[in-house]
Image (cartoon, rainbow, N blue to C red):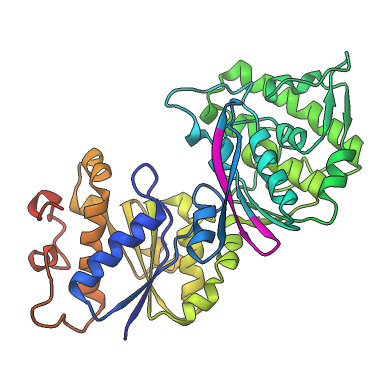
Amino acid sequence: MTTVLLAPDKFKGSLSAAAVCAALAEGIASVRPDASTLSVPIADGGDGTVASAVAVGYERVLVRATDALGRPTHTSYARRGDLAVVELADVVGIAKLPDGIRDPLRASSRGVGEVIAAAISAGCHRLILGVGGSASTDGGAGMLQALGANILDCHGHEIGPGGGNLAKIASLDLSPVLRRMSGMTVTLANDVTNPLLGPNGAARVYGPQKGADPMEIEKLEDGLRRWADAVSEACGRDERASEGAGAAGGVGFAALSVFGARSSLGIHAVLDLVDFSARLDEADLVITGEGAIDEQTLNGKAPAGVAAAARDAGLEVIGVCGRNVLSTLELRRAGFAVVYSLSDLEPDRSLSIRRAGPLVRVLGERIAKAHLSRPAPAGSSRTVVDRLTSCDPSFRIDQCDKP
């Protein structure tokens, strides 16, 4: 029996990674009901990281914490034994904020510290911290406050939330955090290499995405510099220039400096988490992808990591995406045999996003027809694919049966 390993990341703004898996599996089954599909949703340390762990058997643990603006929110972490997988994006991520609401000076990472504290209280001694998609630029100060750090101003009062208050720091006591984290092994899973400060740092590169104007960016930069000085003095370790220190508005810096975290490219951490090499042993073909396959994909994003691992295992890799802007040569170098795009089915981007599920199902049917050679048994359900040819880029969703 042919086994197809489905290992996509999310299609941002339209489908979760699990939903992409489900749509592909439906499409493949409609053409090759005798084929087996194995779904392993993938993430790169950002949103979807906990879901990836849960999909392969980790327990989801519900937690009540605060979002980046200090409002109560429901989130979760994944657990297996003493290992906790914490996803920053699901508690203090920018996607958790209401549309149009940004507060770059006050947004805090405190909520992720609350989730870490809950995992420690539950008996976890190992932590994978996924740090993509942050709404804040506070250097991880809020995260450390939630774990007991005393960050005081010149009047002996706790500073307020957010990077806009970091310049007020007069004293820092990290001893409660160090005691709490004693014995913890922390892996920082991220997909950026930015340092904390400077032209390539957290404030100047990612501040505009979080709503900061030029004056606010400079205020955040000054605050992060004061914070880096205070942390270095308090713990005798200075990671401001390290790769990944600028991740998640400086949460990477706090994890590296205070937790002594080991930095790992997010997709590598997730592939280890889901025991991807063992999944590859079961597969004959691999399908991966994300919303856009572009230059960023080549720089450590999930599909490129999956493709490299599958290629090393001697397996053919097919990509699926909303749109593809890479050349055939770039795709081949990244390990993709071919890439199927929703834009080939529906050029209207807004319609493609709204109907991403049915469109991905069509891609599953097309892939089954082109790459799984045995024909479907007589009488099997074959819907849209009957009207397709493997080289018909003019096919559009409005030509197929409505779901």
- Can you see residue 193? yes
Mark count:
0
Residue 77 is one of the magenta-drawn residues: yes
Q: Is residue 56 above or below residue 123?
A: below
Quick one: 368 or 297, which is closer to the camera?
368
Q: Above or below — where is 209 with respect to 48?
A: above
Q: Is residue 133 visible?
A: no
Magenta span covers which residues? Answer: 73-84
User: Residue sitting at 58 percent across and 32 percent down?
Assistant: 67
Nearest the camera: 326 or 246? 246
Q: Position of residue 130 (x, y in %)?
A: 61, 50
Picture quadrant of residue 71 = top right
In which quadrant is the N terminus drawn?
A: bottom left
Q: Is residue 135 magenta?
A: no
Image x and y of residue 82, in percent:
71, 62
Q: Return the residue found at the far top.
A: 155
Q: Nearer the viewer, residue 201 or 351?
A: 351
Q: Estimate the x, y position of residue 165 in percent, counting from the top left.
A: 73, 20
**What predominant SS class does the magenta segment belong to?**
strand
Left or right: 142 in relation to 292? right
Residue beneath the point at 70% across and 40% down: 113
Q: Give above or below for 200 relative to 290.
A: above
Which quadrant of the structure image shows residue 222?
top right
Q: Is residue 131 left or right of residue 361?
A: right
Quarter of the view holding residue 350: top left
Q: Residue at x 24, y 45 (%)?
A: 352
